[in-house]
Amino acid sequence: METDKCAGTAAPEAGAVLYDVRAERVGEYRAKAGPYLLLRPLGGGREWEAAPADVRPATSAEQLSAKVRAANDQATRNRTEPVNAPGHEMCRPPVPVPGCTECAELGDRRAAARAGFDWSGETDTNVLLRSHQRRDHEV
């Protein structure tokens, strides 16, 4: 962590995922602007300033929620089909690509959610798996 010599406070690592308790938002640390930290939503978007005292590392649940929100926002912006008519690929759960560690991790997370009867968690994981496959596997 780099230290701000003027204020004597430690700045987070670039790219750290933080939770702004005042704004109730998750963001990626971008830079320091005077006494404030600049945070940006995980899926991109408008940066905001947060006081260092109002920021803490985001929990894994907060990170997952922010990633799902970003994936849903991206899908909404890129939608080519009517909302009421899901595409053929959306009717079935995505299949992890063999040999991909991120696909395997998401597949395991989905199986755990399904085993725990957590249908929302299963759906969230499907959204993340589809987003990953579009981005990294061009599926």
Image: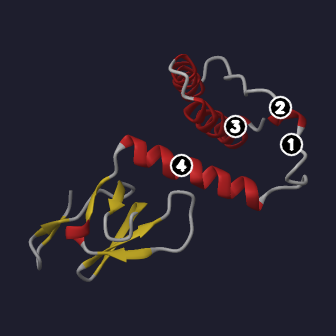
Q: For the residues marked 1 and 3, what is the alpha-carbon distance in whole angstroms?
A: 14 Å
User: Badge 2, how many Cα within 10 Å: few under 14, some, many 20+?
Assistant: few
Looking at the rendered structure, the secondary structure element under dot 3 is helix
Q: Is residue 131 above or below residue 102?
A: below
Question: Of label 1 and label 3, which has the lower sequence position?
Answer: 1
Q: CA distance from mark 1 to mark 4?
A: 21 Å
Q: What residue is pinned by disc 3? A: 130
In the rendered image, residue 58, in percent from the top left (x then y), is placed at 34, 51
Identify the disc placed on residue 91: 2
Distance in Å between CA atoms under marks 1 and 2: 7 Å
Q: Could you tell me if the residues under marks 1 and 4 are in contact, i.e. CB atoms within 8 Å?
A: no
Give x and y (percent) for residue 27. Answer: 42, 61
Q: Which residue is mark 4?
A: 67
Left or right of 10? Residue 102 is right
Q: Residue at x 13, y 68 (%)?
A: 9
Above or below for 61 versus 43: above
* Quadrant position of the C terminus in the picture: top right
Rounded to the nearest angstrom, the CA distance separating label 2 from label 3 is 12 Å
Three-letter amino acid code at disc 3?
Arg
Q: Mark 4: few, some, or many residues within 10 Å (few <14, many ≥20)?
A: many
Q: Is residue 133 left or right of residue 80?
A: left
Residue that carries the numbered disc 1 in the rendered image: 86
- Closer to the camera, 83 or 109? 83
Earlier along the polypeptide chain: callout 1 or callout 4?
A: 4
Q: What amino acid does circle 1 point to?
A: Pro
